[in-house]
Image (cartoon, rainbow, N blue to C red):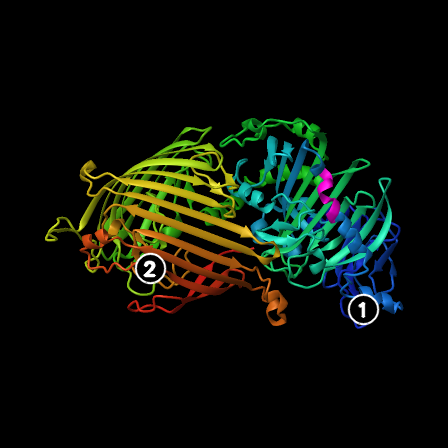
């Protein structure tokens, strides 16, 4: 069997190409020559070596000679012996033309450089090229996405997990870009019709067909969410290209001359059009840049083809390589349209060569363009909750007829291989384990147990706390769902629970009704903007480690009946009626208030009925799923949240009559190559007289961890307010500054700065009502704190230092603190 597998691997490795070359390029001092051009002689097939001088090049044709060139060095020709030439060491000699070396050696000149003169012409004409020159457009699009395990070798194949499933290695192939062996594990094909209107700045993508194979189901939310986030659309003419929540500087950017070197390398006819070839490479390491080359037409200055490979030293995690190539078709003398777009990402835990990783590959093709067919605004209106079942049931015959390019023999076998692999018990168990860690739920039939990460907790009132929960689960697009939990505190020896049911009454507009009840212990006041989430529980109520005493908790009995509707995509209206009782959960903490004008009677429990109306607008938010529960693709979208609540005194023995208005606005902003700024604004006011438990509590953070929208140097109930304005600013430079410091460059740390401020006050009427013993102190002079942090420590850790800026006279006020955060960041 081993000999047979070796033979199959050997055949599959060398079937599809006839010339393969790899190696490293060195100078006279045996130091790597970065970004040299490597090409087969008398051909247009070539690559740019990386910053370490390494390269890999292959072709389906047979070539006897390799040519290496770089400005400042003499061109060198290498004779190739046979079809496969690996690990070559090629030395270049310095050129004799001293003047040329002075102008272009290392960092090229920004003046008197013909390549930059051409680049300026591209900037001038970019709005007149491609689809931009038409008012309206439409075309057919075919997209193929594939994931592969790479760096397959004999050690990998001997792993015990592959015992009795060795047949999968029949599908091992070799990457034409990196030369690594890979094993496909997922493939997805889609065909769609795309419409656009440049005048109205509107687009619409209508899915016509989808073919899926791999683990999961055809509508796997997690996979689709990952794909949508991973492969966002990009335009090479833009100044910045967004990948993995980061802005890479485009080689065609107006700021490109600040970060790239450009060399005019060649010129020739391509498709009867005279084109210039420009090679580019980064001026500095660790920045979010590419290396590669592009061909540009000499009259329209439209791009004919381009390839881009991300700098290996770029400050980005879990990604070893990003490779992009685009080809443009000449529709007529003046129209160049994108014909083919290919992107390959090499995901890996480490950038070390030879370690296993995963390729994510997307190939997109475009054809059948039509122009200036105007459509009304209604056509472009996004449907809120549409699901075309027929798109997922197309026959094999349909795909054979409608693919823009045929699958190769290896790709054709992926579907059958993966469908077979899904039936192997131990592979299914491994897949289920990964699913549990990803979702937090253990699926048992039509029921999910979890979330498992909320099983254990601790606070000063409950002591050690254990929680068990679950939900109904028939599939990711369930039109109804029941979810609940029960919990027990070993210190207070009380049982808590929560249960909630949601049902979608109208799929088109996502009209959903919900009902639930919760009896639990909660840390109220950990968020300025509040909601009636039945199953929600703050981190402050369950933190294992906290600074100071954490006993200011509240017994909450909440019942809520709600309705929501989404008439326009990402615009949600909600209305609810809630009934709750609130009382102190600790003898050391009181919520008492006076109940008469003589201040002789007090109450320690609040009964309150309330109606709530809210608007939640999240433009550009990407969601996955069509059921009552959906998944967010990422958090890079603005959010506007407006809430109005009305207390109903006398309804179900309710105690207070009041009105509360709240506004929450969040805006993430990618600032070119300078990272991302997060801005959060919260404004609120309560009209009427209310006790402490209904006040606005300025959210403190007594944990040792970073919690969004809280104040790191405040304890719970340090500040209260019945009207407030809060502003949080946080900017992540994504390593822009540290990349300029040699000693810090290799660490790939990222700089983060922030400032938080809040102003608020309390009315005299609310102060008079207070019988809790809690001092009502409001930030009437404005409280603020500022922070500086380092992110991406060991790729998963962030450390922030925070300093207090005002109100130093508060008893036991903390002036400085350290907070830690964890997460997987690209």
Q: In the picture, residue 114 is in which quadrant?
A: bottom right
Q: Position of residue 163 (x, y in %)?
A: 58, 49
Q: Which residues are magenta?
A: 123-130
Q: Which residue is mark 1?
A: 27
The CA distance from mark 2 to mark 1 is: 65 Å
How crowded is the residue under tag 1: few (<14 C-alpha within 10 Å), some, or many (20+)? Answer: some
293 is higher (above) or lower (below) than 482: below
Report the side of 391 relative to 484 (left or right). Answer: right
Report the side of 825 relative to 768 (left or right). Answer: right
Q: Position of residue 816 (x, y in %)?
A: 40, 69
Secondary structure, mark 2, is loop
Q: Which secondary structure class fits the magenta region best? A: helix
Q: In the picture, residue 749 is in which quadrant?
A: bottom right
Front position among marks 2 and 1? 2
Q: Which residue is mark 2?
A: 779
635 is higher (above) or lower (below) than 371: below
């Amino acid at each position: 069997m081993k000999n047979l597998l070796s033979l199959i691997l050997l055949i599959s490795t060398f079937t599809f190409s006839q010339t393969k070359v790899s190696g490293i390029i060195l100078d006279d001092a045996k130091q790597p020559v970065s970004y040299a051009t490597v090409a087969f002689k008398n051909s247009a097939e070539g690559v740019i070596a990386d910053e370490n001088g390494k390269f890999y090049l292959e072709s389906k044709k047979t070539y006897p000679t390799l040519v290496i060139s770089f400005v400042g060095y003499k061109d060198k020709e290498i004779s190739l012996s046979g079809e496969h030439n690996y690990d070559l060491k090629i030395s270049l000699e310095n050129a004799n033309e001293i003047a040329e070396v002075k102008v272009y050696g290392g960092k090229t000149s920004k003046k008197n450089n013909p390549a930059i003169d051409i680049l300026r012409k591209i900037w001038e004409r970019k709005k007149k090229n491609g689809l931009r020159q038409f008012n309206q457009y439409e075309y057919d699009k075919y997209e193929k996405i594939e994931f592969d395990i790479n760096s397959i070798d004999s050690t990998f194949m001997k792993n015990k997990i592959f015992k009795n499933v060795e047949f999968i290695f029949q599908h091992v192939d070799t990457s034409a870009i990196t030369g690594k062996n890979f094993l496909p594990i997922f493939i997805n094909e889609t065909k769609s019709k795309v419409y656009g209107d440049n005048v109205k700045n509107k687009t619409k993508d209508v899915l016509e067909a989808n073919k899926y194979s791999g683990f999961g189901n055809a509508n796997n939310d997690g996979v689709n969410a990952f794909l949508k986030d991973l492969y966002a659309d990009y335009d090479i003419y833009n100044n910045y290209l967004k990948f993995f929540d980061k802005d890479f500087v485009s080689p065609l950017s107006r700021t490109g001359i600040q970060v790239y070197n450009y060399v005019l390398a060649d010129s020739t006819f391509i498709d009867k059009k005279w084109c210039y070839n420009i090679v580019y490479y980064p001026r500095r390491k660790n920045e979010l840049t590419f290396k590669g080359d592009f061909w540009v037409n000499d009259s329209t200055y439209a791009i004919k083809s381009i390839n881009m490979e991300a700098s290996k030293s770029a400050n980005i995690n879990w990604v070893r390589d990003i490779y992009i190539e685009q080809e443009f078709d000449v529709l007529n003398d003046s129209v160049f349209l994108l014909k083919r777009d290919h992107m390959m990402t090499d995901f890996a835990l480490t950038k070390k060569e030879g370690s296993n990783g995963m390729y994510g590959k997307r190939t997109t093709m475009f054809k059948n363009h039509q122009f200036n067919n105007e459509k009304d605004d209604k056509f472009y209106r996004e449907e809120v909750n549409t699901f075309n079942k027929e798109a997922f049931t197309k026959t094999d015959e349909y795909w054979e007829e409608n693919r823009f390019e045929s699958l190769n023999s290896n790709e054709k076998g992926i579907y059958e291989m993966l469908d077979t692999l899904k039936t192997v018990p131990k592979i299914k168990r491994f897949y289920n384990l990964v699913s549990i860690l990803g979702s937090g739920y253990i699926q048992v039939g039509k029921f999910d147990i979890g979330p498992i990460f909320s099983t254990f907790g601790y606070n000063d009132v409950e002591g050690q706390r254990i929680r068990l929960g679950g939900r109904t689960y028939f599939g990711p697009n369930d039109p109804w769902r029941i979810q609940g939990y029960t919990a027990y505190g070993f210190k207070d020896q009380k049982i808590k629970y929560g249960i909630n049911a949601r049902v979608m009454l109208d799929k088109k507009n996502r009209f959903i009704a919900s009902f639930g009840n919760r009896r639990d212990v909660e840390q109220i006041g950990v968020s300025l903007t509040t909601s009636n989430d039945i199953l929600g529980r703050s981190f402050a109520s369950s933190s294992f480690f906290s600074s100071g005493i954490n006993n200011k908790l509240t017994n909450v009995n909440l019942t809520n009946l709600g309705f929501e509707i989404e008439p326009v995509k990402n615009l949600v209206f909600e209305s609810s009626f809630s009934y709750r009782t609130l009382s102190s959960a600790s003898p050391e903490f009181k919520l008492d208030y006076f109940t008469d004008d003589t201040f002789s009677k007090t109450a320690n429990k609040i009964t309150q009925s309330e109606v709530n109306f809210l608007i939640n607008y999240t433009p550009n938010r990407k969601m996955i799923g069509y059921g009552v529960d959906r998944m967010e693709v990422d958090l890079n979208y603005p959010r506007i949240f407006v809430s109005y609540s009305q207390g109903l005194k006398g309804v179900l023995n309710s105690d207070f009559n009041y009105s509360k208005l709240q506004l929450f606005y969040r805006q993430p902003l990618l600032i070119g190559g300078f990272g991302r700024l997060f801005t959060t604004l919260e404004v609120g006011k309560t009209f009427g007289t209310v006790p402490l438990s209904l006040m606005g509590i300025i959210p403190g953070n007594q944990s040792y961890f970073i919690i969004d929208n809280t104040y790191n140097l405040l304890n719970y109930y340090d500040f209260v307010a019945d009207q407030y304005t809060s502003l949080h600013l946080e900017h992540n430079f994504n390593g822009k500054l540290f990349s300029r410091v040699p000693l810090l460059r290799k660490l790939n740390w990222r700089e983060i700065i922030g400032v938080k401020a809040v102003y608020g006050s309390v009315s005299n009427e609310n102060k008079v009502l207070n019988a809790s013993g809690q001092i009502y102190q409001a930030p009437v002079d404005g409280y603020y704190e500022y922070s500086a942090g380092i992110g991406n420590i060991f790729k998963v850790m962030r450390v922030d230092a925070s300093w207090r800026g005002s109100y130093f006279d508060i008893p036991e006020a903390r002036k400085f603190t350290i907070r830690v955060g964890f997460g997987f960041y690209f």
